[in-house]
């Protein structure tokens, strides 16, 4: 009992009156031992982040508060601690890292002074000693040029570097507990893999207890010793990583885990030899404009798309995978002529469309359509759902009555109630909105559909449904699809072939199964190796995280 | 690129950006001058009582007013750049001389006002945000709301009624007691006493503005993620407020201070005319009544340039507060 | 609409402001009924104190009724405030919309023009314009509109800039919709809330500018206004404080009420919540 660093008993966190539910967290109990990693898993709104904040006494007072229960840290109930005692604990005995290191760091203070503060407010050290320690810390988290980073401001660092700085800050006084609130969600997979490894290494070195909040079962498989699954503020299941991932008991956990796309690529379907979309030598550069009066340095040129060549065959799904900044979304927008390119050809059924003006492009709009990423931003909040869907056909000159009839059909095809027709987008959930977006793109009966990260803004259970819908529609309408994604798991389940992009270039193209089994380019190998939980497949038994670490 | 070269580049770019604006203002000035009914010769003729058409044509030729408009514009541009703003027939003096004579009084008033308004505005806003939803916050908020809605000239008149006429504490008008022939330190003290009411009057509106902005800005910054980080690091609330939040909250207030300089100059016309403060605003008021358009335009141009200069200074201050300035 | 009113009602001071404005509007509308004579008319004994000689709020040095002036002045203030704001908002929307939507050189040019108008000290510019055009209702409205639009233009530009890269606008492009239609039907309705808020606050500023102009003697000489009353009474400050005081209170209360309504609108239309809807 006393060996637990942290023991939470029957915790209730109350939300302000008038909220959707009375308690954000209800009757939660969990414990964390030294050197252990406990993952708290749940979808958005499950109360996992508030649990983490409660441990630090950082609930957004006075509206949200602990109304019952205990949080024992080394036997001391922190919900009862005085403000001064809490302040002592924070940052020195328990520390925390956050999801978005850009906003979590003060934008107008240098990294060095933000680390220095921790020493100044918790221990007495001389100035030079503090400086020395800070540089040492930055070196420990593998940041290059620690001396320079000391004087750098957050906006001058990359996302990964910022998160490393945050970790350096959090570990400055060798805390007994590290709380990590989705620390890798905002990062690319390769960076995520590095950060996870860093957290693990630091933990082993100083036997820290890590409370890790995440929604990603892949990450859980990689890092957890034990797991707590939360839904709507309740703990639905807890146990060792093995038990929870491989023998989930609660239906919710089972549903969540089965919704995680498998890394086993789907069987490729027989492909038609007919090419519907052909891209040749496509280039797109951003910036590079002249600066004012020649003063200041000229704008930085970014070559977002470099010499891209693509062939999309009739009826197939071609995935374009890459990390943020790889140019995959820009490529999609160039192909559908939302952006003008510098050079290159785009052919639909053999007809060049890249040189067409906007007016000349109009008749081609019903050949190629797009589904967007953010279901909240992709629908005009001021327009009724029916009009959103009917807009396209009406713009292209189809009779209003005909367009409305088609819109009603489409609403039921994408699995929504036809009563949705007269309602506004804000009355729908994220998944439902994405269905509306899909209906809009289908209203013009396109042959080619470009899907730009269509599921990355959705919770994992919704994700599976939308992918299924896309699959059905593709078969039903014999669509050819260009599928942009950063998620290799999703790509494995959806795409027949893959193109891997980095820095605007396609580095490798191949059938999904082949590429997964035998990646040729080193970057493809890195990407695949970085996928969290790659050793875990739902249903099989992974080695426990501990033993894995020892073997590594 | 180091921070200091960044700042130098940024500032020099801002200086160059100011040039076309100044030229544009001169051009606007020129067209306004042409828009007005009658030209300088008509005014002169009016002064003299009567003039023959031949004499007027002769005068027009002498002033170049018979030239085509673009030529006149070029001449005007050249003159302005040489600091020749025309002639005030009313005062029988070059406009530029008149303006420079009055510049000190306005400069003094403006400087004191800005210091008072920004200083106390930031202080009150900070206090209100730190004591959120207490009686202090309520008092400050109501005070700011009311002063924000009060016309400057009316405040000035009410101040005169209360502090000069009823209580007799402060002088009603002017910049100094000329009849007393004070020298040195006594004179400075005399000017200071005269300065109190105009400064308070002019600063009240901006004081309210900065108070409201500062309060809102502090509250917004308190809601940012980095504040949670700072708490999670175990810093004291004092440190969080005065080091983390304050510096970020000041940024929009500093920007606003630059933007509002133009309005402040406009306000000084009213305040100076209420208190008979012998500055540019008073001069503008007098020229308005004397229909001395040349002089009015000169004041307008100079105050525009003043705004650009003050904005530049504000930009430089901003550079030191915010490391995120972009060069391109 | 009903949810809007529910949210607006939560801000008590905004409801108070609305009530005050309604009273001022009623006062302006019924001016000819309350004081059915020319407010410039010499109505009785000069410099009567409030309540004396049948003057509710006293009379000025020429024997004009201060209360009558205030009631008739309400008409002037509201009318000029509203019309000038409307004109300024329209100019601002056109500038801001084209600037934000098309970007590039057009944006550079339009924003440079806006910057010039923002740099010029607006009140002095207004004085100049009115002085050159000769004081009249029209010239005052034009002057106020000319100095007030840049704020709207910047706001609208910012909104258009943000909204044009939103995915719903891109979707309209992929459907082949025309630029004008996208600007008017898709983007503009989504930035109406902040425009309404800034517009309501601009009415207050316009009333302040108008009173300032009238105080300096640049009001329409045929129309009674609060600023004119104060300007006319300032020489009598020592002996007849009421001539200046009451019109000033009228300005203060009206402007305060409009500001409160503006804040209430801001809360009710909540631009921050809007992001996610």
Image (cartoon, rainbow, N blue to C red):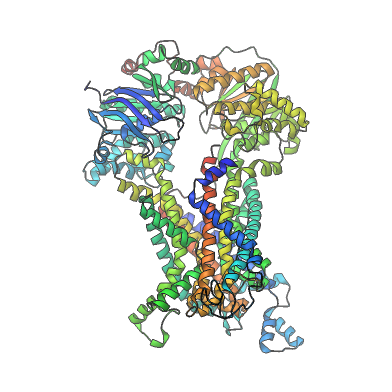
Q: Is residue A447 visible?
A: no
Residue C62, quarter of the rendered image: bottom right
- Vertical relation: B79 (above or below) C12: below
Locate residue C106, reporting x and y percent: 65, 51
Q: Is residue A200 left or right of residue B84?
A: left
Of A33 and C2, nearer the camera is C2
Residue A111 at x, y = what percent? 36, 42
Look at 32% across and 45% down and name the residue there.
A113
Which residue: 35% across, 28% down? Answer: A12
User: In the shown orientation, is residue A72 left or right of residue B23?
Assistant: left
What percent of the width, then of the height, locates residue C275? 54, 40
Q: In which quadrant is the N terminus of chain A drawn?
A: top left
Camera-side residue: C208 or B77? Answer: C208
Q: Quadrant of residue A226?
A: top left
- The spot of residue A185 in percent (x, y) is 44, 29
**Above or below: residue B41 compared with residue C103:** below
Q: How many marks?
A: 0
Above-or-below relation of B125 to C167: below
Q: Quick one: quadrant of the C terminus of chain A?
A: top left
Would residue C231 be seen by someone viewing this image from the given angle?
yes
Q: Quadrant of residue A144?
A: top left
């Amino acid at each position: 009992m006393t060996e637990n660093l942290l023991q939470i008993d029957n915790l209730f966190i109350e939300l302000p009156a008038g909220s959707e539910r009375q308690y954000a967290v209800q009757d939660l109990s969990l414990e964390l031992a030294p050197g252990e990693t406990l993952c708290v898993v749940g979808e958005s709104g499950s109360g996992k982040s508030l649990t983490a904040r409660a441990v630090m006494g950082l609930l957004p007072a006075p509206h949200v508060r602990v109304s019952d229960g205990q949080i024992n840290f080394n036997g001391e109930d922190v919900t009862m601690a005085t403000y001064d005692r809490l302040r002592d604990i924070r940052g020195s005995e328990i520390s925390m890292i956050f999801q978005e290191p850009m906003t979590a760091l003060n934008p107008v203070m240098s990294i060095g002074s933000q680390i220095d503060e921790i020493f100044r407010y918790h221990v007495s050290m001389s100035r030079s000693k503090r400086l020395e320690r800070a540089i040492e810390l930055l070196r420990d988290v593998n940041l290059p040029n620690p001396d320079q980073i000391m004087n750098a401001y957050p906006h001058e660092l990359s996302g990964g570097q910022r998160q490393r700085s945050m970790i350096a800050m959090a570990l400055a006084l060798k805390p007994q507990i590290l709380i990590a609130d989705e620390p890798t969600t905002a990062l690319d997979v390769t960076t995520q893999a590095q950060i996870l490894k860093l957290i693990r290494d630091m933990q082993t070195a100083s036997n820290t207890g890590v409370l890790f909040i995440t929604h990603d079962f892949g990450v859980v498989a990689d890092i957890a010793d034990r797991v707590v699954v939360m839904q709507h503020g309740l703990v639905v299941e807890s146990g060792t990583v093995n038990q929870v991932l491989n023998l989930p008991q609660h239906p919710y956990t089972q549903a969540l885990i089965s919704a995680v796309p498998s890394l086993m690529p789907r069987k490729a379907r027989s492909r038609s030899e007919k090419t519907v979309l052909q891209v040749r030598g496509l280039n797109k550069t951003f910036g590079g404009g002249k600066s004012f009066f020649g003063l200041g340095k000229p704008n930085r040129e970014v070559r977002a798309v470099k010499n891209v060549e693509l062939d999309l065959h009739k009826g197939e799904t071609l995935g374009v995978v890459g990390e943020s900044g790889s140019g995959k979304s820009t490529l999609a927008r160039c192909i559908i002529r939302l952006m003008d390119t510098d050079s290159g050809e785009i052919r639909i059924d053999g007809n060049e469309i890249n040189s067409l003006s906007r007016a000349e492009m109009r008749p081609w709009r019903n050949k190629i359509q797009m589904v967007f990423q953010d279901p909240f931003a992709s629908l005009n909040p001021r327009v009724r759902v029916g009009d959103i869907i009917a807009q396209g056909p009406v713009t292209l000159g189809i009779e209003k009555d005909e367009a409305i009839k088609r819109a009603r059909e489409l609403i039921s095809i994408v699995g929504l109630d036809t009563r949705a027709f007269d309602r506004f987008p804000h009355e729908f959930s994220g998944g439902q909105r994405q269905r509306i977006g899909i209906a809009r793109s289908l209203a013009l009966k396109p042959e080619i559909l470009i899907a730009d990260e269509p599921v990355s803004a959705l919770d994992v259970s919704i994700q599976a449904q939308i992918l299924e819908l896309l699959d059905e529609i593709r078969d039903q309408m014999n669509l050819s699809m260009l599928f942009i994604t950063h998620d290799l798991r999703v790509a494995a389940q959806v795409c027949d072939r893959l193109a891997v992009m980095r820095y605007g270039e396609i580095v490798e193209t191949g059938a999904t199964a082949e590429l997964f089994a035998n990646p040729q380019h080193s970057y493809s190998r890195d990407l695949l190796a970085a996928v969290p939980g790659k050793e875990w497949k739902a249903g099989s038994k992974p080695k426990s995280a501990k033993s894995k670490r020892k073997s590594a | 690129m180091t921070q200091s070269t960044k700042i130098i580049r940024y500032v020099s770019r801002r200086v160059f950006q100011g040039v076309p604006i100044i030229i544009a203002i001169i051009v606007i000035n020129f067209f306004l001058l042409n828009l007005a009914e009658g030209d300088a010769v008509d005014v002169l003729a009016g002064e003299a009582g009567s003039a023959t058409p031949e004499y007027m044509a002769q005068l027009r030729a002498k002033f170049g007013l018979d030239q085509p408009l673009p030529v006149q514009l070029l001449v005007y541009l050249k003159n302005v750049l040489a600091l020749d703003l025309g002639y005030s027939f009313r005062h029988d003096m070059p406009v530029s001389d008149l303006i420079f004579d009055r510049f000190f009084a306005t400069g003094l008033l403006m400087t004191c006002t800005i210091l008072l308004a920004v200083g106390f505005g930031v202080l009150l806003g900070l206090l209100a945000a730190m004591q959120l939803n207490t009686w202090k916050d309520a008092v400050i908020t109501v005070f700011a709301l009311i002063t924000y809605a009060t016309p400057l000239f009316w405040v000035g008149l009410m101040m005169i009624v209360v502090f000069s006429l009823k209580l007799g504490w402060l002088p009603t008008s002017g910049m100094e007691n000329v009849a007393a022939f004070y020298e040195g330190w006594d004179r400075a003290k005399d000017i200071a006493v005269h300065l109190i009411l105009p400064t308070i009057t002019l600063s009240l509106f901006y004081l309210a503005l900065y108070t409201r902005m500062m309060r809102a800005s502090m509250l917004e910054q308190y809601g940012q993620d980095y504040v949670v980080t700072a708490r999670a690091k175990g810093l004291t609330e004092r440190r969080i407020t005065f080091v983390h939040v304050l510096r970020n909250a000041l940024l929009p207030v500093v920007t606003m201070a630059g933007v509002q300089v133009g309005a402040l100059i406009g306000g000084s016309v009213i305040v100076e005319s209420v208190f008979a403060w012998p500055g540019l605003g008073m001069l503008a008021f007098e020229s308005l009544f004397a229909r001395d358009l040349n002089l009015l335009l000169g004041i307008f141009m100079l105050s525009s340039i003043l705004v650009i200069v003050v904005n530049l200074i504000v930009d430089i201050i901003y550079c030191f507060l915010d490391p995120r300035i972009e060069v391109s | 609409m009903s949810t809007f009113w529910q949210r607006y009602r939560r801000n008590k001071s905004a409801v108070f402001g609305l009530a005050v404005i309604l009273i001022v509007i009623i006062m302006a509308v019924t001016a000819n009924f309350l004081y059915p004579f020319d407010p410039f008319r010499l109505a009785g004994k000069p410099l009567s104190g409030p309540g004396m000689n049948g003057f509710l709020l006293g009379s000025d040095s020429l024997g004009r009724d201060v209360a009558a002036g205030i009631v008739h002045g309400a008409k002037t203030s509201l009318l000029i405030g509203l019309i000038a704001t409307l004109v300024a908002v329209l100019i601002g929307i056109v500038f801001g919309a084209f600037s934000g939507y098309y970007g590039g050189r057009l944006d550079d040019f339009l924003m440079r023009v806006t910057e010039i108008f923002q740099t010029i000290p607006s009140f002095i510019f207004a004085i100049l314009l009115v002085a050159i055009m000769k004081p009249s209702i029209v010239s005052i409205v034009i002057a106020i509109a000319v100095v007030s639009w840049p704020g709207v233009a910047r706001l609208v530009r910012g909104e258009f800039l943000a909204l044009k890269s939103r995915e719903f606008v891109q979707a309209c492009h992929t459907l082949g919709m025309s630029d004008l239609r996208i600007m008017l039907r898709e983007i503009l309705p989504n930035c109406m809330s902040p425009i309404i808020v800034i517009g309501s606050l601009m009415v207050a500023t316009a009333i302040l500018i108008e009173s300032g102009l009238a105080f300096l003697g640049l009001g329409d000489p045929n129309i009674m206004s609060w600023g004119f009353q104060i300007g006319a009474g300032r020489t009598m400050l020592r002996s007849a404080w009421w001539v200046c005081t009451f019109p000033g209170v009228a300005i203060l209360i009206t402007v305060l009420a409009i500001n409160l309504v503006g804040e209430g609108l801001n809360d009710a239309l909540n631009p921050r919540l809007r992001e996610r809807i």
